[in-house]
Image: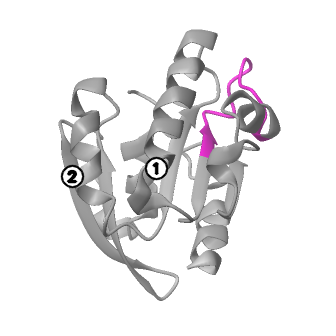
Amino acid sequence: ANGGKTTLVNQLKPTKTRDLEVAPTVGFSVERFTLHKCSLTVVDMSGQSKYHDLWECYYKDAQAVVYVVDAASDEAALDESRETLHEMLAHEHLAGRPLLVFANKSDLPNARSAADVAAEVHLTGAACEGRPWHVGACVAVTGEGVDEGIRWLLGKL
């Protein structure tokens, strides 16, 4: 929760359709738009643990996973983020699906680098074997680093 998922999705949308203010997601929201000549359906899932069971409803149709980590969060939050990510990646419907992890809020002085986030959430482990994955630093509020990550992902689909 509060990692920047909705802000990131808002950055991906065409400028004229962006929301001026982003509120925390309750449950989920679905956005459809075209980016780099690709039609995208983005399901923005609430990060609150009470909604995690909802996530599974969307795994079957998912072609890729974008996971947002607050690179400036404390150890406990990173531990929770790692557990949640690995639980999700273990689901049969997500086997082999490309994974893009955004290390968000990378502009903050206490933010970890993308490489450190990759190590902290154990992306080199079994969950990522047989799956293309990438970690990129970003700043969702300005869009910095977002397009590079999305271009990597679209290249894998």
How would you rate the neighbour count of disc 2 (Cα within 10 Å): few for under 14, some for 14-19, many for 20 or more? few
Element under disc 2 = strand
Q: Is residue 92 magenta?
A: no
With 129 as the anchor, is 59 left or right in this view? left
**Prevailing SS of the magenta stretch:** loop
Q: Residue at x 75, y 27 (%)?
A: 112
The label on residue 29 is 2
Q: Are marks 1 and 2 in contact (CB under 8 Å)?
A: no
**Relative horizontal placement of residue 59, taking residue 73 as reference (left or right):** left
Rendering quarter of residue 94: bottom left
Residue drawn at (69%, 32%), measured in percent from left and top? 107
Tell me the magenta residue range: 102-114
Q: Please, what is the three-letter code of the amino acid marked with disc 1?
A: Leu
Task: Estimate how packed mark 1 is, as few (under 14), some (14 to 19) or many (20 or more) residues with alpha carbons within 10 Å.
Answer: many
The type of residue carrying mark 2 is Ser
Along the polypeptide, which appears first: circle 1 or circle 2?
A: 1
Question: Which quadrant of the figure has residue 76?
Answer: top right
Q: Which image quadrant for residue 11? A: bottom left
In the depicted view, which residue is nearer to us: 4 or 76? 76
As drawn, is 155 to the left or to the right of 9? right
- Determine which residue is flagged by label 1: 8
Quadrant of the rendering where the C terminus is positioned: bottom right
Q: Distance of mark 1 from mark 2, alpha carbons? A: 13 Å
What secondary structure is found at the residue carrying circle 1? helix
Which mark identifies residue 82? none
Q: Percent from the top left, x then y, of residue 84?
A: 46, 32
Q: Is residue 114 above or below residue 32?
A: above
